[in-house]
Image (spheres, rainbow, N blue to C red):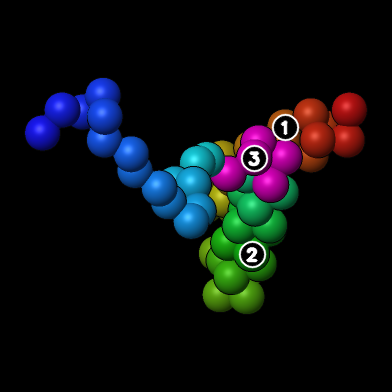
Amino acid sequence: MNMLNCKVTKEKPPLGIVPEKLYEEDRIVALIRALNRYADDGVIGHRVTVVWAEELVKRLKAYNG
């Protein structure tokens, strides 16, 4: 089969990548939800929550310009 003469038609293009703004929004929401879950269980102050909180602040500053 000669690939130069082969015509492939697709109804939809392949999936690409999530736009950066949507990724940032999803990550911010995920961080907030995770921190809320830990807060609901009384685990605020744990090392991982501090790291998440720092990341959240950094992302919110960048997102809001």
The answer to which of 62 and 47 lies nearer the viewer is 62
Q: Residue furthest right?
A: 65
Q: Quadrant of the C terminus?
A: top right
Q: Which residue is mark 2?
A: 33
Q: Amino acid at mark 3?
A: Pro
Residue 11: give x, y in percent of width and height.
48, 56
Of marks 1 and 3, which one's residue comes earlier in the chain?
Answer: 3
The majority secondary structure of the magenta stretch comes to: helix
Q: Which residue is mark 3?
A: 19
Q: Are marks 2 and 1 in contact (CB under 8 Å)?
A: no
- Give the magenta range: 18-22
Left or right relative to 13: residue 6: left
Residue 36: give x, y in percent of width and height.
66, 67
**Is 2 situated above or below 46?**
above
**Is 53 situated above or below 11?**
above
Q: Amino acid at mark 1?
A: Lys
Task: Give the residue at x 50% y 53%.
Answer: 12
Callout 2: SS: helix
Q: Amino acid at mark 2?
A: Arg
Query: Disc 3 to disc 2, how far (Cα)?
Result: 21 Å
Task: Give the residue at x 69% y 47%.
Answer: 22
Q: Which residue is mark 1?
A: 58
Query: Disc 2 to disc 1, how far (Cα)?
Result: 16 Å
Of marks 3 and 2, which one's residue comes earlier in the chain?
Answer: 3
Quarter where residue 24 is shown = top right
